[in-house]
Amino acid sequence: MTQESKITPEQLSKTIFDTMRAKSILANQNALAHNEVLKRTPAWKGKVKENGNKLILSLIKAEREEFDVVQRAENTLEDFKGQNVIDQAFDRSNKIITLLARMVFTDYDDIETVIMALAKDKSSMLGIARKVNSKKTI
């Protein structure tokens, strides 16, 4: 590793913080969206309703403080104007959460294995996925 390619502790800290912030924003946005849907079901009563309403208020506050700030910043950057990167990230993460919710919990180890393989060899895993997804279902 050359001297120029080394990351400073400050850069590492900022990268970790920014990554954690992005994860937090997406998690809070997804939680808010799903709880707003749950709010319109018969399950929204008693303690679920009491605690859920408090949670929704907290998530709305978090959205104002984090999500909206990032979205405004995104709109000031020429490379991102009009692309709705934050909205796209939310939509994609929401699709993944929906897929995970449909899975049986016992399959989560297999999902983790697939994700780890994707991280190691993206090209091969995408080739396999495209082949499997192109098969007609019965």
Image (cartoon, rainbow, N blue to C red):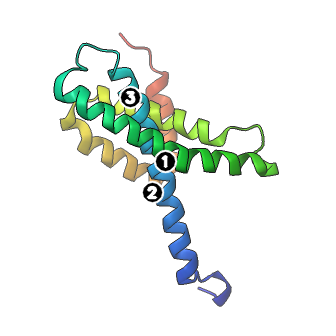
Dot 2 amino acid type: Lys
The residue nearer to you, when weighing 84 against 57, is: 57
Of circles 1 and 2, which is in front?
1
Of circles 2 and 3, which is in front?
3
Circle on res. 25: 1
Marks 1 and 3, how far apart at CA: 14 Å
Look at 53% across and 75% down and name the residue there.
Answer: 12
Look at 44% across and 51% down and name the residue there.
Answer: 24
Residue occupied by mark 3: 34
Does dot 1 land on a helix, a strand or a loop?
helix
Q: Residues within 10 Å of mark 3 (few under 14, many from 20)?
A: some
Q: Quadrant of residue 100?
A: top left
Q: Quadrant of the N terminus?
A: bottom right
Q: Where residue 104 appears, x then y in whole percent?
A: 22, 30
Check the image and report above or below for 65 versus 32.
below
Q: Where residue 81 appears, x then y in whole percent?
A: 78, 43
Dot 3 amino acid type: His
Residue occupied by mark 2: 120
Q: Where residue 122 appears, x then y in whole percent?
A: 51, 49
Does dot 3 land on a helix, a strand or a loop?
helix
Relative to 70, 124 lies left or right: left
Marks 2 and 3, how far apart at CA: 32 Å
Chain-order first, disc 1 or disc 2: 1
Dot 1 amino acid type: Ile
